[in-house]
Image (cartoon, rainbow, N blue to C red):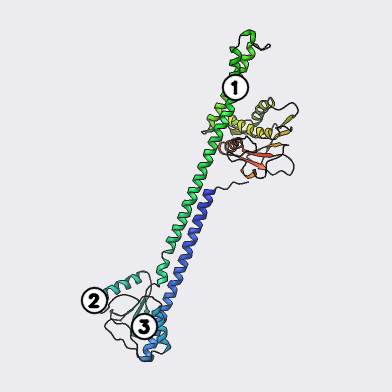
């Protein structure tokens, strides 16, 4: 099962949508430009036909077209429709003077107005628009339609919307990640307190025992037993502190024999398995020809221990079996599978079982499997999965890369 990296997925989606918006808008702009070119050609043809059929005349100081006899001709109607479209239109005579303008606010009877219109024509030419040729060699320039002028802002509106969406997504992801980190640190602090609490309580018990007068001490407890008990508790404290010291940084990795790692874990767990009414049987199966791996013995043992303890909690009060099998996987990989015969994982928790703070136990802190995943996937570059079981119990599949010799 591949976990989705949501920041990468959102960034990719954002870039795809942004690119699509830009391409789509550009296609619209090109289409409108083509319509503009065709309209200018139509207008030029209309001008020629009007002059040929009606002898259209121009009057007025501003140079605009006036009604002439024969205006009822459909060609005049066509020309008038073009004017009403709102598209700026400039007609320049063969001598280079502006003879008529439409939908453009300028008085062409003055030198200033002439220069204003010519400056506009130069901007049109800079965009690559070719003029249409009208009657008598006149040049007809059509500017951008009003719709096209408004369309220029669409990419910026779209980009602003996408940027706002991306920003909100980033803030949400950042908030969620920070909340998960806070939850993880809280759970880890509780786990540390729990793991330190047992040996500390034991040491306090030994201290109280040693403070009793010799005649009041329970019989059968010799000084050697007290020293051994204190030594064992100190080793447990050292083990816990070393584990949490390594989890906050990148440890030095070394070549490990998986058989030795599993054997040490088995010896540690065998002394802690229930032996009475709810007996739990631990079955370990590790062939001799297993490849070596590159890892941290302390952290890898901790990760495996957390998964097995999770299985022990599932079997609490009912007993059962826990199996730990190691097999060769595809080239370059080693597979460990831990299975228990317990009730299995609640379907509502399956997708969140590795998240900090998620636990199937009433008093669980939900940090054990989170630490296991971090150790296996971040430190050892491996993978851990909760498999779907058709029968009873839960099965965790752990995949570790082998050492490259």
291 over 48 or under it: above or below = above
Q: Nearer the viewer, residue 205 or 199?
A: 205
Of pointers 1 and 2, the one earlier in the residue sequence: 2
Task: From the top left corner, tell me how far across and down residue 297 is, in percent.
Answer: 59, 30
Would residue 189 be found to the left or right of residue 335 on screen? Answer: left
Q: What element carries label 1?
A: helix
Q: Nearer the viewer, residue 295 or 372?
A: 372
Q: Name the residue under label 1.
A: 201
* Residue 60 appears in view: yes
Task: From the top left corner, tell me how far across and down residue 400 is, in percent.
Answer: 62, 38
- Residue under the image location 56 percent in, 30 percent down: 192
- Of badges 2 and 3, the one in the foreground is 2
Q: How many marks?
A: 3
Q: Mark 2 points at which residue?
A: 111
* Residue 252 appears in view: no
CA gap, disc 2 and disc 3: 24 Å
Q: Residue 134 carries which label?
A: 3
Q: Quadrant of residue 87?
A: bottom left
Would residue 124 be found to the left or right of residue 302 on screen? Answer: left
CA gap, disc 1 and disc 3: 103 Å
Of pointers 2 and 3, the one earlier in the residue sequence: 2
Quadrant where the C terminus is found in the figure: top right
Q: In which quarter of the image is residue 399?
A: top right
Task: From the top left corner, tell me how far across and down residue 277 is, in percent.
Answer: 76, 28
- Residue under the image location 42 percent in, 76 percent down: 37
Q: Is mark 3 on a helix, strand or loop?
A: loop
Q: How crowded is mark 2: few (under 14 residues within 10 Å), some or many (20 or more)?
A: few
Q: How crowded is mark 1: few (under 14 residues within 10 Å), some or many (20 or more)?
A: few
- Of badges 1 and 2, the one in the foreground is 1
């Amino acid at each position: 099962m591949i976990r989705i990296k949501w920041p990468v997925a959102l960034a990719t989606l954002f870039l795809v949508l942004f690119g699509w918006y830009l391409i789509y808008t550009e296609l619209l702009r090109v289409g409108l430009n083509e319509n503009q070119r065709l309209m200018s050609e139509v207008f030029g043809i209309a001008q020629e036909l009007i002059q040929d059929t009606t002898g259209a005349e121009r009057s007025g100081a501003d140079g605009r077209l006036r009604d002439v006899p024969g205006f009822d001709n459909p060609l005049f109607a066509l020309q008038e429709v073009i004017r009403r479209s709102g598209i700026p239109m400039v007609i320049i005579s063969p001598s280079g003077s502006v003879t008529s303008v439409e939908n453009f606010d300028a008085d062409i009877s003055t030198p200033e107005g002439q220069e204003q219109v010519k400056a506009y024509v130069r901007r049109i030419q800079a965009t690559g628009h070719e003029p249409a040729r009208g009657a008598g060699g006149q040049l007809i320039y059509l500017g951008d339609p009003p719709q096209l002028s408004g369309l220029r802002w669409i990419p910026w509106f779209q980009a602003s919307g996408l940027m706002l969406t991306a920003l909100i997504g980033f803030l949400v992801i950042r908030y969620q990640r920070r909340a998960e980190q806070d939850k993880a640190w809280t759970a880890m602090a509780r786990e540390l307190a729990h793991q330190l609490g047992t040996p500390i309580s034991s040491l306090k018990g030994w201290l109280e025992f040693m403070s009793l007068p010799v005649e009041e001490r329970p019989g059968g407890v010799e000084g050697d037993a007290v020293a051994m008990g204190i030594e064992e508790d100190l080793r447990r404290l050292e083990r816990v502190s070393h584990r949490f010291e390594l989890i906050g940084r990148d440890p030095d990795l070394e070549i490990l024999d998986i058989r030795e790692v599993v054997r040490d874990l088995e010896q540690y767990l065998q002394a802690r398995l229930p032996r009475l009414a709810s007996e739990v049987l631990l079955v370990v199966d590790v062939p001799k020809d297993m490849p070596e791996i590159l890892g941290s013995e302390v952290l890898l043992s901790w990760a495996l221990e957390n998964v097995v303890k999770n299985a022990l909690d599932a079997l609490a009060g009912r007993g059962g079996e826990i199996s730990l099998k190691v097999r060769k996987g595809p080239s370059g990989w080693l597979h460990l599978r831990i299975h228990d015969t317990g009730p299995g994982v609640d379907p509502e928790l399956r997708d969140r079982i590795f998240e900090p703070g998620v636990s199937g136990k009433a008093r669980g802190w939900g940090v054990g499997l989170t630490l296991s995943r971090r150790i296996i996937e971040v430190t050892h570059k491996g993978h851990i999965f909760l498999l779907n079981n058709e029968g009873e119990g839960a099965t965790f599949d752990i995949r570790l890369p082998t050492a490259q010799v």
